[in-house]
């Protein structure tokens, strides 16, 4: 039996197709992918022309050039999906970030005085107006904000926290571990489900550095429960002469109860209730870039700014520019993409489901079954953990002979991957996060989808 001999690397490189690839991707990467394509064909026992080998190498090169952070279609039914980058920035925030990338900006330069300034000043007035806080500082995320608070005020001393608020976020942020890392000593009070004012009063001593209230943003304890409101803790903290820190976690500047969701305390609420320091995130309900905020008393904020850890946690000019634009949207009452997705009417999503079901049936062919179905969408990223918004999803049953897992994997392998969730043998693509103006681009991810192997 004669062995099948694919063309040599040199022969393939001599084709017009390979020359185009070498100009675009470079000679060495092109030659390497040609070798890989030849090896694949030799292993499969296939007989191919040099042009066909070049075409296979082109697919390999294109796959190698795909960014690991390429855009995806979020059809998971979670608006703020941590694994998909959480909040999407508004076009104004994107433009501001782009401007900061392309030009020098007055990051730490006081244009009025003509000398050195503070990068936190870029949004200080905006935050003061939106929240009522005296002062503010910015770090790279809320975990950093909490760490900086503890390192500045509680190293070697006690922090009083209710047992029902000893949170873990994402498997990597455990409040007791954060305290240990900063040298603070945890003083647990109360029980998992019930903590009373006298528990805090009894725990107070000359070793108390802070009283800390932590919003349980990613879980709910129901039934026989009790906690101490932030306003009452603020009075106790003032009487004891120690600061109250209110860690909101997700943090919001708007009241999500207006969307039919359970009330979440706003940043302005926490400030008005008397917290000396308030910490929260920028890339969750705020709808901005990843950032951590500390707002509160000016004297405490000033001490934090002088801590050596502050420099290690500071924001760069790109995220700071995007954050400033996001806060300006709040000041004038404009929705960012996060709030637009939460506010989207269920009827509008249902109509989109009807339109897109027809179009995807045409793209996928008669072997696939596509229908719009009622769905529920969660906020995600530790916000309103038990609440959902009504939505519509496209339920896709693959063609006979194709598993739903293989079909979902094929969609994830597209140039712009489509990410959904599998339920009861069907792939569900929730549409709450799909803007109407993006429907054509979304449908473009489906034509030519080859039936994957089982």
Image: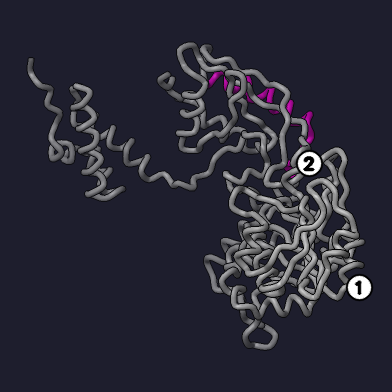
Answer with the quarter of the image where residue 183 lies.
bottom right
Of residues 236 and 292, the one nearer the viewer is: 236
- Across and down, in percent, residue 289 comes to 63, 57
Of residues 128 and 153, the one nearer the viewer is: 153
Name the residue rendered at 18%, 27% in the picture.
42
Which element is circle 1 on?
Answer: helix
Q: Is residue 309 above or below residue 117?
A: above
Q: Main secondary structure of the magenta part?
A: helix
Q: Which quarter of the rendering shows the N terminus?
A: top left
In the rendered structure, find residue 239 and report the number of the disc placed on it. Answer: 1
- Across and down, in percent, residue 428 comes to 62, 26
In the rendered structure, find residue 285 and report the number of the disc placed on it. Answer: none
Answer with the quarter of the image where residue 73 lies.
top right
Which element is circle 2 on?
Answer: helix
Of residues 360 and 224, the one nearer the viewer is: 224
10 Å crowding of disc 2: few (<14), some (14-19), many (20+): some
Count of numbered badges drawn on the protein = 2
Report the magenta residues as a range: 340-363
Among numbered discs 2 and 1, the one appearing first in the sequence = 1
Name the residue rendered at 82%, 54% in the picture.
190
10 Å crowding of disc 1: few (<14), some (14-19), many (20+): few
Report the Cα–Cα distance between label 2 and label 1: 42 Å
Say which residue label 2 marks. 343
- Across and down, in percent, residue 12 comes to 17, 36
Q: Nearer the viewer, mark 2 or mark 1?
A: 1
Of residues 427 and 224, the one nearer the viewer is: 224
């Amino acid at each position: 039996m004669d062995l099948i001999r694919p063309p040599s690397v040199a022969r393939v490189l001599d084709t017009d197709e390979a020359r185009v690839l070498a100009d675009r991707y470079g000679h060495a990467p092109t030659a390497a992918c040609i070798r890989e394509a030849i090896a694949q064909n030799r292993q499969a026992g296939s007989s191919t022309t040099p042009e066909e080998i070049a075409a296979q190498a082109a697919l390999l090169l294109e796959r190698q050039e795909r960014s690991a952070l390429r855009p995806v279609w979020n059809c998971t039914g979670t608006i703020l999906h941590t694994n998909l980058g959480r909040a999407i920035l508004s076009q104004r925030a994107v433009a501001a970030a782009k401007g900061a990338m392309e030009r020098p900006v007055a990051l730490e330069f006081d244009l009025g005085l003509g000398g050195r300034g503070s990068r936190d000043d870029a949004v200080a007035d905006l935050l003061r107006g939106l929240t009522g806080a005296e002062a503010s500082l910015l770090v790279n995320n809320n975990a950093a904000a909490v760490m900086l608070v503890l390192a500045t005020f509680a190293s070697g001393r006690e922090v009083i926290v209710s047992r029902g608020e000893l949170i873990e976020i994402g498997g990597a942020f455990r409040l007791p571990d954060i305290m240990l890392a900063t040298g603070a000593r945890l003083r647990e009070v109360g029980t998992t489900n019930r903590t009373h004012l006298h528990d805090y009063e009894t725990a107070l001593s000359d070793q108390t550095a802070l009283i800390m209230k932590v919003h349980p943003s990613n879980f709910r304890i129901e039934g026989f429960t009790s906690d101490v409101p932030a306003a009452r803790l603020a009075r106790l903290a003032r009487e004891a002469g120690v600061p109250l820190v209110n860690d909101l976690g997700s943090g919001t500047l708007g009241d999500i109860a207006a969307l039919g969701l359970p009330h979440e305390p706003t940043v302005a609420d926490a400030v008005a209730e008397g917290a000396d320091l308030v910490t929260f995130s920028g890339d969750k309900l705020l709808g901005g870039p990843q950032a951590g905020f500390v707002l509160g008393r000016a004297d405490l904020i000033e001490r934090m700014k002088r801590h050596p850890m502050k420099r290690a946690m500071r924001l760069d000019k790109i995220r700071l520019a995007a954050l400033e634009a996001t806060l300006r949207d709040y000041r004038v009452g404009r929705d960012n993409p996060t709030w637009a997705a939460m506010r989207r009417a269920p009827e509008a999503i249902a109509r989109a489901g009807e339109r897109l079901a027809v179009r995807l049936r045409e793209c996928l062919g008669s072997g696939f079954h596509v229908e719009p179905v009622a769905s529920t969408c969660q906020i995600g990223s530790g916000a309103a953990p038990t609440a959902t918004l009504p939505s519509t999803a496209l339920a896709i049953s693959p063609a006979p002979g194709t598993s739903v897992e293989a079909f979902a994997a094929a969609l994830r392998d597209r140039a712009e991957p489509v990410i959904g969730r599998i339920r009861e043998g069907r792939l569900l693509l929730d549409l709450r996060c799909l803007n109407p103006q993006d429907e054509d681009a979304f449908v473009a991810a489906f034509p030519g989808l080859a039936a994957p192997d089982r």
